[in-house]
Image: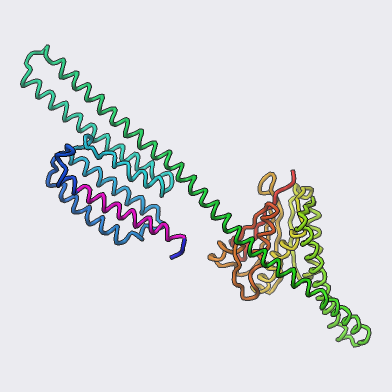
Amino acid sequence: MTNASLPFNASQQQLALLRLVNWGLKIGLILFATDLFGLTTPPVTLSYVLIFEACYVGFSYRFHRLSMNNNGLLFLTLLLDTLFWATWLYFTGGATNAFVSLLLLPIAISAITLPRWAPWCLTIVSTIFYTLMIVDITEQNSGSVMDHDMSQMPMAANHVMPASHSMDMGSHYLGMWFNFVISALVLTVTVGFIAKRIRQKNAELRYLREAQLRQEKILALGTASAQMAHQLATPLATLRLLTDELVDTHHDAEQLELISEMQQALNRCEVTLADLRLATESIREHKLTEQRVDKLVATLTEQISLLMPEAQLNIAIAPQVESCIVMTDMSLLPALMALIQNGIQASEDNQHQTRVDINIGLSQPNQLTMTIRDYGVGIATHLLQTLGSNMVKSPKGMGIAVLLSHTSFERLGGKLYLKPHSECGTEAIVTLPLSV
């Protein structure tokens, strides 16, 4: 059981206990408070209903976890609660029962815990039951008044007062019905709206808390990276001098080829270190520059050709976005290259080819979308929810590349979404706001 399910589990247990208290209240009112509250003496039929309800209450308390994260099952239990309350009210006085307002309790609970359709359904069901009880008590009173008139008031002229009295009671019952409907609608609309706002606020707070934790991790990683980058500068310079000396002293073709590969690796390290320094300065000074999308794609292609010459990129850019402007800094390019590098590695591991497709277009009038698709085996479903928000264990690395990229896009006002492709592989969807 996850930590997120613990509060919901506790609320389900409290609901089961409340159901037990309601059942005990019904028994107590019948046994000890029938005359006190003017309840009708219930028939034997109600005893069988209460026995069946006791079995239901015990089952719901024992297996309350079954309705966890299951809105349909929770709605069914609240619907049964409404039916049991309506049955008890019908046999103990109907609409004249002083506890008829307890029919509103399942509506209030559903408005807090369930989607919007649930309280509306319970409101309709409760209103139907209450309407039937109002009609029943009205017919009973009309019949009793007419019988009383016929037996004790034979003169036609004397029928005026009882009819007026019947009209007063009818108006009273109509007012009771109208009051019940208004109360149910207020609970359905108002409580549901407040509960929705609370859930939205909780979701926002949870997102901010996760973002703060992610920023703390990024800060720690950035501090460690800056320190290590500073320490790498001197060894890289030493290695550059040694490779230059090797080129001057060795003339064998095979050795020169190995030295050339070493120099390419050193070039890549030096370029990355220089970009890291520029990115650090840009982020520290909050420098944002305007860049055309076609220029950004050209720079990205050039960097990939230089650092990953084996990559097979298929870039498709929509004509209407080539001249669009995005606000960027030095962190955008490394973030995109990290996603492309992950895609190249995934495609190579699965199909032994470094193929990656990049589609660039508009998802909204002022939003640029870049879709980076690889041909790997895909990402596990349980990792798609956390990848990019937390560090994930990776067999070939620390699993922080996507986290760093996601943070860079967020800082620029964008987002990163990961989803499996219908055929194979994974799609990394990057959205960035366009400069208006």
Residue 291 covered by magenta stretch: no
* Side (left or right) of 411 relative to 281: left
Q: Quadrant of residue 271?
A: bottom right
Residue closest to the eye, 384 or 63: 63
At horizontal 75% and vertical 50% (from top left) the residue drawn is 326
Q: Quadrant of residue 30?
A: top left
Q: Position of residue 295 (x, y in %)?
A: 81, 55
Kindly give the residue lying farthest to the top in the view shown. 157
Residue 59 is at least partly visible in this image: yes
* Side (left or right) of 252 relative to 24: right
At horizontal 7% and vertical 17% (from top left) the residue drawn is 153
At horizontal 33% and vertical 51% (from top left) the residue drawn is 76
Residue 421 is at least partly visible in this image: no
Residue closest to the eye, 254 or 233: 233
What range is drawn magenta here? 4-26
Q: Position of residue 336 (x, y in %)?
A: 72, 61
Residue 12 covered by magenta stretch: yes
99 shown above or below 75: above
Q: Position of residue 22 (x, y in %)?
A: 26, 49
Q: How was this image coloured?
A: rainbow
153 shown above or below 205: above
- Image quadrant occupied by the C terminus: top right
- The secondary structure making up most of the magenta span is helix
At horizontal 28% and vertical 30% (from top left) the residue drawn is 176
Q: Position of residue 416 (x, y in %)?
A: 64, 57
- Image quadrant occupied by the N terminus: bottom left
Residue closest to the eye, 316 or 207: 207
Q: Quadrant of residue 175?
A: top left
